[in-house]
Image (cartoon, rainbow, N blue to C red):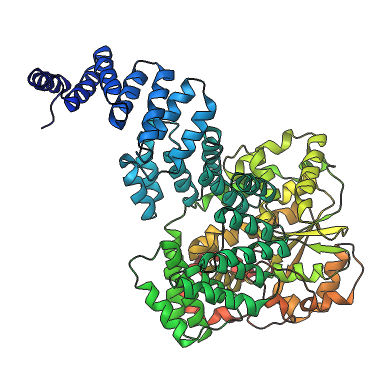
Amino acid sequence: MNASPAQAEALLRAALDAEPNNNDAQLLLSEALRRKGDLAGALHFAQMQARARPQWFGAQRQLGVVLAGQGEPLPAALAFKRAAELNPAHPTIWRELAEQSALAGDGQTARAAYARHGAMPPEPALKPVAEALAANDAAAAEARLAEHLRRLPDDVAALRMLSEAQARAGRTDDAEATLRRILELAPDFMFARHSLGQLLMGLGRLEAADAEANYLLRLDPDNEGSRRLKAAILNALGEFDAALAVYEKLLKDTPKHAGTWMSYGHVLKTVGRTGEGIEAYRKSIALEPRMGVSYFSLANLKTFRFTGPELKQMEAQLERADLTTNDRVHLLYALGKAHEDAKEIEPAFRRYAEGAKLYRSTIDYDPARLTALVEASERMFTPEFFAERAGGCEARDAIFIVGLPRAGSTLLEQILASHSMVEGTMELGDLNAIAFELGGGGAEAVYIDKLPGLTQAERKELGETYLRTTRIQRKEGKPLFINKMPNDFRHVGLIQLILPNAKIIDARRHPMACGWSCFKQHFAMGQHYTYDLAELGRYYRDYVRLMAHYDAVLPGRVHRVIHEALVADPEPHIRELLDYCGLPFEEACLKPHETERAVRTASSEQVRQPISARGLDSWRAFEPYLDELKAALGDVLAAYPAVPRGN
């Protein structure tokens, strides 16, 4: 049974009566008196020990703790600084120094100390949080952090763990806000800045991500993690030669880093150097056999086939107890693809479903959010609403390709990018960023309510902002550019208000074919609705419903391309597409596979083949397993390619 502070004081005073120079007893008595509330007495013994043993960490830290309790931040910070010099590995000393330095007005010392604290291993109080994160239980991690951060709201180590939990739960806005709070406290905390750079890159905010990478490289030009982040951002910006150069230098410096080989493979694949990309992926696997994302990257080439030994190696990796959830998910999807290629239908579906179920358990997704956005759009967007708000940014530069993933959008992008007046870019998140900002970071439907209050000048400014932030992706100086971001179908009304002359193309594919193709694809980020068949069917229904509403209130505004019709008879549909975009016909658009350009999506290898109707019905082999998808689609399935009455 633990003694109370008063009991401890009595025992320690008795010990000192017997041995007045007992240093340990004096220090313990200082702590007992502090806990009892006798700070003057605690300070007396702490000072005695600090003077008597200036090289003893415990005495210097105790002096800092007591002075902090007395509201004396400057002398407390000085004591903590001496303690930190004596034992820099102590789990809380840098936090204590940072807090008191900040209170004393010494921001420079506070920022440096916060950065040191953030880089330390978790202190004992945070070990349960680390265990929850290791188990991929973001909710438990957040719950455990709540009380800690109530007591210590500026603990950058705890805040870093909070940002990780938020990101894993899919709450990227919260994760970003937490990381920015950390960097207010500790601008040179490299781990947090690196995490922010990665998050911003994943959200498509590449200029902001690049700024974080450049800050990191100014801190330490040789840091390998910062160089890898810079290379990944260069790749995302379309600066492929520069990205390859960074990776090649990294591989020269650290040739046995599996992650660098994997990332190098991604860039090689993107620029069409597929054979070299495959070798890079295989090199990463040889160095780190449990790296699931490398197996998945091979499978994701679509045209690649695993060897028998590679299949056995993947199955063996699944048996490892030390396999992370992320690696396990990627391995399951890779095995699903391998079984599908071998026409082993049941094991293929089983592996895909295991991967989807496991990943779905790690993310926060509510299908009602899209339904709420659709309902808000139907209420708000009427012919009269748009007629009263004519005008915006009149530029004609942008061509939006929207719909669902795996619906033929990459093929449409490649067809248009084969035209001499059109530049293909990538999946740009700039429009979604505008919607997010308008909504103040709230639920998706919230921003709709802000649109009626926008003036014509504000709408024009938002359109100009979109063109400005996307300009970094335009390398060729062509008059038109493509933003192939399927999920932007949610924002057709916003496009009409801010860019009324932009073109909008809806890529649509048979709901079962599209649904199955989405379900078996593990996406790099987002598309959280694709990991459950019923949720996927509901999402497709909501998409059809919303696009039908836009067809009704803005007739002819959106040009729809039915994928099956396009691949069955390409030329008339390509001519219609070019006419809609106001472009003269060019023969190159009929041979998009001959256009040399970087393609980042899962269809990168497929669009380098001639237009073909192959694979349209590949879903039918899996039809016995897709009842949940069928049920959720309902009359949308029966009506395709038309839409149900009432939509």
User: Along the line of sight, which residue is nearer the eye, 230 or 162?
Assistant: 230
Report the residue at 73% width, 36% height from top: 452
The residue lying furthest to the top in this view is: 40
Position of residue 106 relative to residue 478, above or below, is above
Work out which quarter of the rendered image holds the N terminus and state it: top left
Q: Residue 411: in sight, yes or no? A: yes
The residue lying furthest to the right in this view is: 584
- Which image quadrant for residue 75? top left
- The spot of residue 151 in percent (x, y) is 37, 29
Work out which quarter of the rendered image holds the C terminus and state it: bottom right
- The spot of residue 381 in percent (x, y) is 72, 45
- The spot of residue 115 in percent (x, y) is 49, 38
How many marks the image carries: the answer is: 0
- Which image quadrant for residue 635? bottom right
Q: Residue 646: in sight, yes or no? A: no
Report the residue at 52% width, 83% height from top: 306
Position of residue 550 relative to residue 590, above or below, is above
On the picture, is 92 further left or further right than 269?
left
- The spot of residue 361 in percent (x, y) is 42, 58
Report the residue at 56% width, 72% height from top: 297
